[in-house]
Image (cartoon, grey):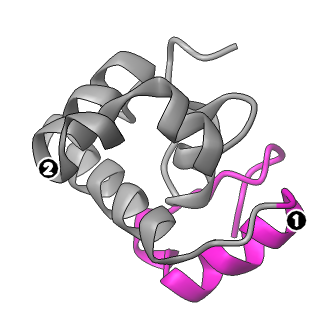
Amino acid sequence: MSDDKNYLAKLPQWTAEKAVSLGLEQDVQIGHDHLKVLLLARGFYKDYGFSPSMRPLCKTVAANLGVNKGRSIYLNQLFPGSPAKLVAQLAGLPRPKNCL
Protein backbone atom coordinates (compact mmCIF):
# COMPACT_ATOMS: atom_id res chain seq x y z
CA MET A 1 0.00 0.00 0.00
CA SER A 2 1.31 3.43 -0.85
CA ASP A 3 0.18 7.00 -0.39
CA ASP A 4 -0.79 9.34 -3.22
CA LYS A 5 2.84 10.21 -4.03
CA ASN A 6 3.80 6.54 -4.43
CA TYR A 7 5.83 6.55 -1.22
CA LEU A 8 5.26 3.35 0.71
CA ALA A 9 2.97 3.78 3.67
CA LYS A 10 4.60 0.97 5.66
CA LEU A 11 8.33 0.32 5.70
CA PRO A 12 8.23 -3.50 5.90
CA GLN A 13 6.56 -3.64 2.47
CA TRP A 14 9.83 -2.73 0.76
CA THR A 15 11.81 -5.25 -1.24
CA ALA A 16 14.54 -4.85 -3.82
CA GLU A 17 12.04 -6.11 -6.39
CA LYS A 18 9.62 -3.34 -5.38
CA ALA A 19 12.44 -0.81 -5.82
CA VAL A 20 13.13 -2.13 -9.32
CA SER A 21 9.44 -1.86 -10.20
CA LEU A 22 9.15 1.67 -8.81
CA GLY A 23 12.38 2.61 -10.58
CA LEU A 24 10.97 1.58 -13.95
CA GLU A 25 8.03 3.90 -13.32
CA GLN A 26 10.57 6.72 -12.80
CA ASP A 27 12.74 5.72 -15.81
CA VAL A 28 15.52 4.55 -13.49
CA GLN A 29 16.98 1.09 -13.99
CA ILE A 30 17.92 -0.08 -10.51
CA GLY A 31 21.29 -1.79 -10.39
CA HIS A 32 23.72 -2.88 -7.69
CA ASP A 33 24.99 0.67 -7.06
CA HIS A 34 21.44 1.97 -6.71
CA LEU A 35 20.57 -0.76 -4.21
CA LYS A 36 23.60 0.09 -2.06
CA VAL A 37 22.38 3.69 -1.75
CA LEU A 38 18.78 2.60 -1.10
CA LEU A 39 19.90 0.26 1.68
CA LEU A 40 22.03 3.01 3.22
CA ALA A 41 19.02 5.36 3.18
CA ARG A 42 16.91 2.68 4.88
CA GLY A 43 19.64 2.25 7.50
CA PHE A 44 19.70 6.00 8.05
CA TYR A 45 15.93 5.97 8.56
CA LYS A 46 16.21 3.08 11.00
CA ASP A 47 18.89 4.92 13.00
CA TYR A 48 17.40 8.43 13.00
CA GLY A 49 13.67 8.01 12.35
CA PHE A 50 13.49 10.23 9.28
CA SER A 51 14.48 10.08 5.62
CA PRO A 52 17.78 11.72 4.75
CA SER A 53 17.66 14.96 2.80
CA MET A 54 20.47 15.55 0.32
CA ARG A 55 23.24 16.62 2.70
CA PRO A 56 22.79 13.72 5.19
CA LEU A 57 22.39 11.32 2.26
CA CYS A 58 25.70 12.48 0.78
CA LYS A 59 27.44 12.15 4.17
CA THR A 60 26.03 8.66 4.73
CA VAL A 61 27.01 7.46 1.27
CA ALA A 62 30.49 8.99 1.60
CA ALA A 63 31.04 7.34 4.98
CA ASN A 64 30.02 3.93 3.69
CA LEU A 65 30.94 3.86 0.00
CA GLY A 66 33.72 6.44 -0.26
CA VAL A 67 33.98 10.17 -0.78
CA ASN A 68 33.58 10.01 -4.58
CA LYS A 69 30.25 8.22 -4.28
CA GLY A 70 29.08 10.63 -1.60
CA ARG A 71 29.10 13.56 -3.98
CA SER A 72 25.84 15.01 -5.22
CA ILE A 73 26.94 14.62 -8.85
CA TYR A 74 27.28 10.84 -8.40
CA LEU A 75 23.92 10.58 -6.68
CA ASN A 76 22.35 12.72 -9.41
CA GLN A 77 23.69 10.31 -12.03
CA LEU A 78 22.06 7.38 -10.25
CA PHE A 79 18.90 9.19 -9.21
CA PRO A 80 18.30 12.08 -11.64
CA GLY A 81 16.36 15.16 -10.66
CA SER A 82 16.02 15.20 -6.90
CA PRO A 83 18.20 12.35 -5.58
CA ALA A 84 17.10 12.48 -1.94
CA LYS A 85 13.43 12.50 -2.87
CA LEU A 86 13.83 9.70 -5.43
CA VAL A 87 15.98 7.62 -3.07
CA ALA A 88 13.33 7.91 -0.36
CA GLN A 89 10.60 6.90 -2.77
CA LEU A 90 12.52 3.93 -4.17
CA ALA A 91 13.71 2.86 -0.70
CA GLY A 92 10.17 2.79 0.63
CA LEU A 93 10.75 5.70 2.98
CA PRO A 94 8.70 8.81 3.73
CA ARG A 95 9.50 11.88 1.68
CA PRO A 96 12.42 13.85 3.18
CA LYS A 97 11.17 16.94 4.99
CA ASN A 98 13.57 19.34 3.27
CA CYS A 99 12.70 18.22 -0.27
CA LEU A 100 10.22 20.19 -2.35
Looking at the rendered structure, the secondary structure element under dot 1 is helix
Q: Which residue is mark 2?
A: 64
Q: Residue at coordinates 17% horizontally, 35% vertically from top-left?
A: 48
In percent of width and height, residue 56 lies at 28, 23
Q: Quadrant of residue 68?
A: top left
Q: Is residue 93 left or right of residue 45?
A: right
- Give the answer, above or below, for where 88 lies relative to 19: above
**Residue 69 seen by the camera:** yes
Q: Residue at coordinates 49% horizontally, 75% vertically from top-left?
A: 14
Looking at the rendered structure, the secondary structure element under dot 2 is helix
Disc 2 marks a residue whose amino acid type is Asn
Q: Quadrant of residue 26?
A: bottom right
In percent of width and height, residue 92 lies at 53, 59
Q: Is residue 52 left or right of residue 2?
A: left
Of the numbered discs in the image, which one, if any, rests on residue 25?
Answer: 1
Q: What's drawn in magenta, residue-wise?
A: 1-27
- Could you tell me how far apart the alpha carbons at marks 2 and 1 are, in whole angstroms? 28 Å
Mark 2 closeness class: few <14, some 14–19, many ≥20 residues within 10 Å:
few
Looking at the rendered image, the quarter that the C terminus falls into is top right
Q: Which dot, 2 or 1, sits closer to the camera?
A: 2
Q: Quadrant of residue 67?
A: top left
Total labels drawn: 2
- Give 52 or 3, whichever is nearer the viewer: 52
Disc 1 marks a residue whose amino acid type is Glu
Looking at the rendered image, the quarter that the N terminus falls into is bottom right
Label whose residue precedes the other's in the sequence (2 or 1): 1
In percent of width and height, residue 78 lies at 60, 50
Q: Is residue 9 left or right of residue 27?
A: left
